[in-house]
Amino acid sequence: MQYYLVVGGTGVMGTAAIKAIRSVFGENAVIVANWYGKEDTGEAIEGADHTVFGDITENSCLEKIKSINSGSYDYLHYATALGDVGFAIKESSPEQIAHSNRLSFDPILQLESELNIGTIVTYSTFYSLKHQLCSYGAMGYSKEAIEKWTLEEGKSKRLCIRAGLFESQSSRGIKLLLRKNAKKIDNIKDPLLRSYFEGVPSKDGIENFLNGIINEEKEKYGDSPTTPETLFQAHLELLKHEGPPFINVCGKMIWRDNEAQILD
């Protein structure tokens, strides 16, 4: 039997990971899925053998995970993140970056150190595109930290799925913050981001901005937006084939490479 730990098992990426693991390994996979919210509803995560409720940054949650298979996992999929977004990456303060790293990056290091994990899978985005540079906020630095870390030698093998625009809790959060900021246009400093909201209702500005992301991704990578099905296919590529550590998925396009995205 192989053991798989999915942190963020209720999100879009976590759901794709669980579906792919079960598709490739069937009942030979024991899937442990973690999630956290305002309250523990007691519901089991679909496709998982064990559901662990808890904040992954707290020791009590880590101890629950350690208690299963003596803390040994063939794969960890770290599919959770939280940080300030809705403004240019370069405008992030040190405090905002540290706050973003608290859930988006730091626990990965602790999990690698305290558990026995064969392969750690992390998640990133195309934050070097101009539309992401002007809106991804402190999360941009957390994703850069993940990508740099992926290329370093460590206790576990490291892989990273880098995805284009798809509907998720994170993307909805960005849209809400953009709408809030658009009510006071002077608060938007980045000229590209500001151009989408000047002289139009905030709802139209957000729609135009999302279309801008889609058009940039299509021009750069050939397709956009990304769907749950293509996220599933990217996970199949990761689980079935060896190759460079970054698995890119943008629309229907899936490819691998060796390069981290470095912010200026």
Image (spheres, helix red, strand yellow):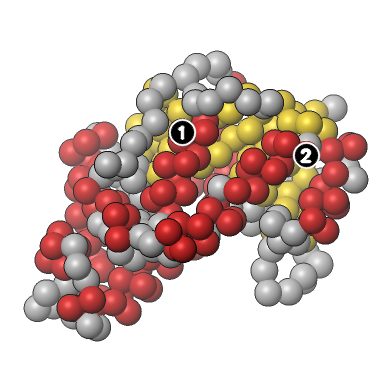
Q: Which residue is mark 1?
A: 148
For this orientation, the residue located farthest to the top is 242
Q: Residue at (85%, 52%) from the top-left corner?
A: 64
| Type of amino acid under label 1 | Lys
Instruction: Tell me, for residue 80, which label it has, or none.
Output: none
Quick one: label 1, few (<14), some, or many (20+) residues within 10 Å?
few
The percent coordinates of residue 42 (x first, y second) are 81, 67
Indicate the position of residue 48 as horizontal and vertical percent values.
76, 47
Residue 2, x across and y down, in percent: 80, 28
Could you tell me which residue is drawn at 17 percent across and 78 percent down?
A: 186
Quadrant location of the C terminus?
Answer: top left
Going from the N terminus, do you reach mark 1 or mark 2 first? 2
Q: Which residue is mark 2?
A: 114
Front position in the image: 159 or 110: 110
Indicate the amino acid at tag 2: Glu
Relative to 79, say whether 211 is above or below. below
- Residue extending furthest front? 94
Badge 1 element: helix
* Disc 2 element: helix
Q: Is residue 258 visible?
A: yes
Which quadrant of the figure has residue 19?
top right
Looking at this view, is 83 or 166 the one in front?
83
Query: Label 2 crowding class (10 Å Cα cut-off): few <14, some 14-19, many 20+?
Result: few
Check the image and report above or below for 138 versus 125: below
Q: Quadrant of the N terminus?
A: top right
Front position in the image: 36 or 87: 87
**Residue drawn where x is 17% and y is 72% of the image:** 197
